[in-house]
Image: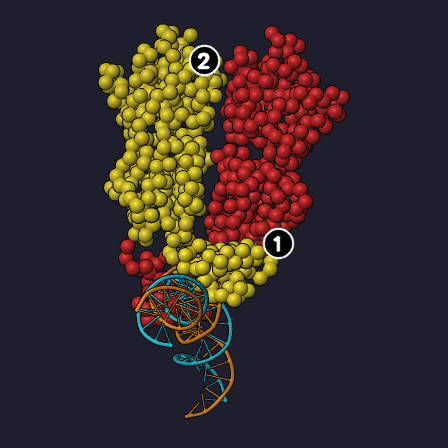
Chain colours: A red, B yellow, C cyan, D orange
DNA sequence: ATAGTTTAAATAAACGATTTAAATTGTGCT
DNA sequence: AGCACAATTTAAATCGTTTATTTAAACTAT
């Protein structure tokens, strides 16, 4: 590698000061236009590379924004991340991505690393059991945080997420409307705010329709295809013989449908299944999946926007922002057939 | 936010020099053990946060490693990334992830940003059409590059990937062994080294079995579920009536199976389908997918290892490293049925 | 005691940018 | 020619570490 080119290299070869070069490269009107052009040209010719760490040491803005979620490979987060990425890109911010896999420790490490790197801000979908201090660690060190998808009790940080309770009640009502009375809820956990909200939405819908809530119909489990697939066994052996399932998300629903199909039943006819999120995949599953759109792109876009606004000082975001979910009816749900899945 | 705590803050409150504090925090034997303890304790008490940009400005090692692939949301890359992540984590390196979506420009921007941040190295699955200069840009500026999954002509950079030609020939031979003679190849492109290798593997296997190669049986397309789903229409209307399909990857295969099922045929019985990669999903698809394990985790792990070794100076990686794929036979392939998909 | 070692801590010079006050040059006007 | 004023340019201080070099203190052995 050739000797490293820095501001002073350009300055020397051109016989000006580094101050002038610095100013010129950022197009400051303090430098005469002709000088500016000469300097930029020389920078290009020498293959100059801007050293951000040196700059940020002085300016204390790094242009780095951290994003940490449960699992970036999960398509639900994937869609959020895509939206965040395109919003940050527009502002030429670098974003650093990480999974916490619901490990509070891994999450704390990430926040710490980000602080060390001088991150300007962080967007997080907090790990289960995150203590408020872990978020305050960021805030107290001048790195504003924005939450997405999950809330944390007793913390005053802006948050963007879908209205889970309402969303699940949409799905549940849809099934009730089709005549179903024994409806299971499959997948996920009750340890997150999201989980509690969703269960609540399911319970509310049943109550409003005067259907008794049977706790045995709640089958918690991993929020993945694999999880749904494995839940099928439990689902099919429930004594109450449910005729429909409200699933935690599309992945669980697709897994469950696969499991049901494996057992020789036809999802959408013998058993109605709803998903949640409306991933791209939902519409090409067989049968295509009835689900609830959860506004992922909207969540990502507005969370990123809020952070950027806060950083630029143009607007201070606050409070909780709920995106309204919408029903997407497809082929995986149908009217109650009186034989149930006994046939 | 309280006043920022730095080395000198600790030094002053303790009446020692910043040099001593710096050394102490990194556990240097140059500092008396008792002093070391006193300093570490104080650092904790004050909530000191190490400033990596200041440090790396001096040391020219940032602890940052960049990774750029076509699409991090694609599960194929997901599995590679997971392996890279865990390998880098072990060495406490921060990794910065990015998609290039096959835009050479986006990729170049990423490399440039990484250089500005002082990245120590970069792992990339190059975008289609990447000119060698774009990789040399990194190397020339002291940031070593390692390629994964895709090669670039005329460039001497270490690369780790599966043996595509061999892998596809495994799948093709499997189908031939089941009696199939009209075998389509679905999905993907011939614009990448991977694409050319795969097509070659398919052609080789057919030739060896004395089966004529019909270019019309090559149906290129997006490497996604959606792509496979949409290819079904073309596939089913081919005049030669293929009885089997070798798919670009598992996603395409699953999409194709969904499309075939939509048309009323039963994949695995009426049409045999093979995937490629052996994603987690392959085994829970319905029918479960016959596919070729492509060593994603192995690729990720060893690429990361190679980079770290190079950075630590312990070992200089070079050349091309081919991981040997393996067949995974499941339910989506079966013996030729003489009516084909005409029945 | 004294010179010679060892051990412990301090000093000061980088690293590569930014930024502000001050210096320099240039221009038009009387 | 002299002056006010604007347009350019620059010197120097900073940001928070690391590290080679010095200095100081504490032992050792004669």
Front residue of D30 and B192: D30
Q: In which quarter of the image is the N terminus of chain A?
A: bottom left
Query: What residue is shown at x 41% (from left), y 56% (from top)?
Result: B29
Crowding at mark 1 (Cα within 10 Å: few <14, some 14-19, many 20+): few
Q: Tell me whether the residue at label 2 lies in contact with that at label 1, contact meaning CB atoms closer than 8 angstroms.
A: no
Query: Measured from the top left, where is residue A96 in percent x and y?
Result: 48, 46
* SS label for mark 1: loop
Query: Measured from the top left, where is residue B81 in percent x and y?
Result: 42, 37
Image vertical order of residue B177 relative to residue A175, above or below: above
Tell me the quarter of the picture where residue B86 sits: top left
Q: Which chain carries label 1?
A: A
* SS label for mark 2: loop
Q: Distance between the residues labelled 2 and 1?
A: 57 Å
Query: What residue is shown at x 54% (from left), y 45% (from top)?
Result: A108
Query: Measured from the top left, where is residue A140 in percent x and y?
Result: 59, 54
Front residue of B218 and A10: A10
Image vertical order of residue D1 relative to residue A313, above or below: below
Query: What residue is shown at x 53% (from left), y 28% (from top)?
Result: A224
Name the residue carrying label 2: B266
Image vertical order of residue B192 relative to residue A48, above or below: above
Name the residue carrying label 1: A315
Q: Quadrant of the C terminus of chain A?
A: top right
């Amino acid at each position: 590698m050739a000797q490293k080119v820095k501001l002073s290299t350009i300055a020397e070869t051109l016989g000006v000061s580094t101050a002038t070069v610095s100013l010129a490269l950022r197009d400051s009107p303090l430098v005469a236009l002709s000088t500016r052009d000469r300097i930029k040209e020389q920078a290009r010719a020498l293959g100059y590379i801007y050293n951000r760490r040196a700059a940020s040491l002085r300016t204390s803005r790094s242009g780095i924004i951290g994003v940490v979620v449960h699992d970036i490979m999960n398509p639900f987060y994937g869609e959020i991340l895509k939206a965040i990425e395109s919003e940050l890109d527009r502002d030429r911010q670098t974003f650093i991505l990480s999974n916490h896999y619901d490990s509070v420790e891994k999450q704390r490490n990430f926040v710490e690393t980000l602080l060390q790197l001088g991150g300007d801000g962080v967007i997080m979908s907090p790990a289960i059991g995150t203590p408020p201090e872990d978020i305050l660690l960021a805030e107290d060190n001048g790195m504003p945080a924005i939450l997405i998808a999950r809330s944390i009790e007793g913390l005053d940080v802006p948050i963007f997420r879908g209205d889970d309770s309402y969303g699940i009640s949409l799905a549940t009502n849809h099934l009730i409307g089709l005549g179903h009375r024994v409806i299971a809820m499959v997948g996920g956990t009750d340890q997150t705010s999201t989980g509690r909200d969703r269960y609540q939405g399911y319970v509310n819908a049943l109550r409003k329709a005067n259907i008794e809530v049977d706790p045995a119909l709640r089958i918690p489990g991993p929020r993945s295809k694999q999880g749904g697939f494995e839940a099928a066994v439990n689902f099919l052996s429930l004594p109450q013989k449910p005729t429909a399932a409200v699933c935690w998300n599309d992945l669980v629903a697709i897994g469950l449908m696969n499991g049901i199909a494996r057992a020789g039943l036809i999802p959408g006819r013998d058993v109605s299944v709803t998903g949640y999120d409306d991933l791209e995949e939902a519409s090409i599953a067989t049968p295509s999946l009835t689900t609830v759109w959860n506004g992922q792109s909207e969540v990502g876009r507005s969370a990123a926007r809020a952070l950027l606004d806060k950083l630029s000082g143009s607007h201070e975001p606050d409070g909780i922002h709920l995106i309204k979910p919408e029903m997407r009816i497809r082929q995986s749900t149908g009217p109650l057939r009186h034989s149930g899945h006994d046939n």
